[in-house]
Structures are given as C-alpha cells and as structure tokens.
Image (tube, rainbow, N blue to C red):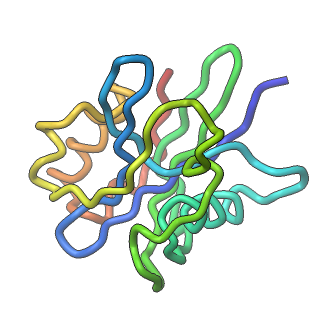
Amino acid sequence: MKRISTRGIIFIDDAIALIYREKNGQQYYTLPGGGLEEDELLTDGVAREIFEEFGINAKAKKLSYVYSDENSIAYYFLCDYVDGDFGTGQGEEYSPERNSGFYEPRLIKIEDIKNISLKPDKLKEMLIEDILLHNKSLSDCIKFFN
C-alpha cells in the first residue's frame, strides 16, 4: 500500500513558507507536510502538518499538484494563511531525539524561489511557472508528476 501524504503551499505577503533542511550532507527546502493519520481527510492532514511545523493555522483552498511513485502519493494544496505566529511549530521534526537532520521554518521571497534548492525539482519548475502565469492563486488545473 502506498504512503499517502499532504503538503501545503502557503503564501504570506510576498513570501512562501518553506522548511529549510540539512540532511545527509544536503541543504534544501521543502514544503510543509507529512503522512496522513488513520481516517484523516487530506485537507485536515495538511492543516495539521502546517500547524505542527510552522505554528500557524491554514486552510486548504485547492489541490494544485499530485506526486506519485511506486511507494507513495503526495497531494499538494494551495492554502490560505488564517492566523498564528510563523515559526512557533512544535512538531516531531524539532525533537532532539529525531536524528534525521536539521529543520528550520523560513519565509522565502517569491522572486527568490528560482535561486534556492526546492525539492522535488519538478515541483519547483511547475510552481515557478504557475506563479509567473497566475501569481499566488496558481493554476486551477491539477498537475500530476513523478
């Protein structure tokens, strides 16, 4: 059975909310998210993950991208920032006993996305294209990639 996860795309003013990662000698950014809990709705999962990782409340607005491979499927939602103080997350990622690298929430200016290592690479390409064509509302078409 494939692992199901959700990820959130959150624009706050002129920036996008990302997680800076250092893991296995690599430095890169990812969107907030993680695996679904049992019987959890996709939209509830993304809101929970965003709160855990960033300390902010967000609401899923629309499904924008879907990634799949032989082991997993990830749903990327454009989300609206509701409230909360960015950077106050208390998720398991920040636990000292978690030995899977370094995590730090960061706000990256939209125009700087092209200059960072955002994983997965194909997502970065699609996101930049959508922002150029549709600004922060992204496309209304769901894009699939692997």
For the residue pair 109 and 19, the one nearer the viewer reads as 19
| Residue at the far top in the pictured view | 70
For the residue pair 22 and 18, the one nearer the viewer reads as 22
Determine whether 112 is above or below 56 in the image: above
How many discs appear? Answer: 0
Task: Give residue 99's quadrant in the image.
Answer: top right
Residue 93 position within the rendered picture, expressed as x and y whole percent measured from the top left: 58, 47
Residue 139 position within the rendered picture, expressed as x and y whole percent measured from the top left: 34, 54
Q: Residue at x 42, y 80 (%)?
A: 85
Q: Residue at x 65, y 51 (%)?
A: 92
Q: Residue at x 44, y 44 (%)?
A: 103
Determine whether 122 is above or below 56 in the image: above
For the residue pair 64 and 37, the one nearer the viewer reads as 37
Q: Is residue 74 left or right of residue 30?
A: right
Residue 33 position within the rendered picture, expressed as x and y whole percent measured from the top left: 56, 49
| Residue at the far right in the pictured view | 39
Residue 56 position within the rendered picture, expressed as x and y whole percent measured from the top left: 49, 75
- Image quarter in which the N terminus is found: top right
| Residue at the far front in the pictured view | 96
Task: Give residue 68's quadrant in the image.
Answer: top right
Q: Residue at x 49, y 55 (%)?
A: 8
Determine whether 145 is above or below 93 in the image: above
